Amino acid sequence: MNYPVKKWYNAIFTRKSRRKFLNKKISLEFMSQLKKVSTELNHTMSGARVVIVEENPDEVFKGIVGSYGKITGAPAYVAFVGDMNDQNVQEKVGYLGEALILEATSLNLATCWVGGFFKPEAVASHIKIDNHEKVLAVTPIGHVQQEYTMQEKLMSGMSSSRKRKDLNILLPKSSPENLEEWEKTAIEAARLAPSAVNRQPWRFALENNAIKVSMDNFKGTYNISKRLDCGIAMLHLELGAMYSGVKGTWDYLPDPDVAIFKVEGIVT
């Protein structure tokens, strides 16, 4: 799949988690586009897939979703499914799932990553899940009012969902002042990735024409894998690099490292 780099890169800066939807049906045009992209994404990577479900997802969510408030009114949702026999399943699901979320964002549709507070059995009643597969996360999808509701404002303020860690923390062994332009753009994009309770578990290390992504530690949160969060950041990092004219490939690494992005050449 040829990524729509500019469109998805721009969506990184406008994507926000939303929880109150308008009970408004998604247009056939937008739904067809999402299904087209989901099909293409599912052919790009083994071990993970995204499934669009045109069902009201209210029964999928467990009441109050963490500290972020109840999700209501979405006309559809997306299930992010992983092959648990794949040792890199978590980062693959994060990477692939975020691609669809950025596509939805580019269509002015709202989303919200939900990894620990949903009912897998409810999702299984809507889609087929193989024995070796597991639904690792979901997102509601739909239209929202432009302004946050009072509850969303309250929850957003309580969770500090838009605050980002300083680059000196994210780049513990390198000086941010010495970054090349493509490295800076890539890491800034990765820095904006969403994560469970905004924990931002990714750390970056610069190598020769490469950027390595690692976890900060093994401490978990709500039983949601940090490698999944890092998979989201991996896509952001790659989009930032490509937006700067640099293309590369990912090699997966064992804990506590996640993967390394190796420069292959210039985007044409």
Image (cartoon, grey):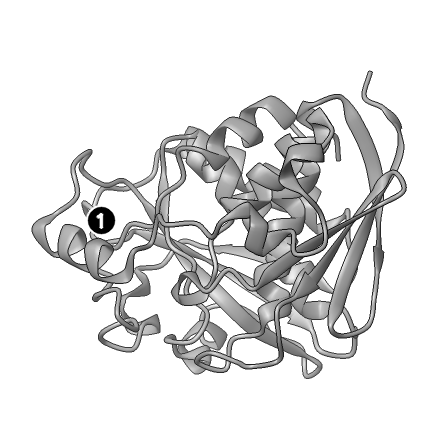
Image: 12 above or below 73: above
Q: How far from the left and from the top, in percent, is residue 230?
A: 62, 59
Displayed quadrant of residue 22 = top left
Q: Quadrant of the N terminus?
A: top right
Q: How many numbered circles does the render carry?
A: 1
Say which residue appears at 78% left-offset and 58% top-offset. 259
Furthest-top residue in view? 268
Image: 123 above or below 17: below
Q: How far from the left and from the top, in percent, is residue 46?
A: 79, 59
Q: Amino acid at mark 1?
A: Phe
- Residue 97 visible at all: no
Say which residue appears at 21% left-offset and 65% top-offset. 69
The answer to whether 21 appears left or right of 7 in the picture is left
Q: How far from the left and from the top, in percent, is residue 181?
A: 69, 25
Say few, some or many: other residues with alpha carbon within 10 Å of mark 1 (under 14 / 14 to 19 / 20 or more): many
Which residue occupies the foreground of this view, 180 or 189?
180
Provide the residue designation for mark 1.
Answer: 21
The answer to whether 140 appears left or right of 86 in the picture is left
Say which residue appears at 57% left-offset and 38% top-offset. 189
The answer to whether 10 appears left or right of 62 in the picture is right
Label 1 SS: loop
Q: Quadrant of the C terminus?
A: top right
Displayed quadrant of residue 262 = top right
The answer to whether 214 appears left or right of 7 in the picture is right
Say which residue appears at 43% left-offset and 76% top-offset. 116
Image: 176 above or below 53: above
Displayed quadrant of residue 235 = top right
- Residue 245 visible at all: yes
Image: 162 above or below 71: above
Which residue occupies the foreground of this view, 66 or 126?
66
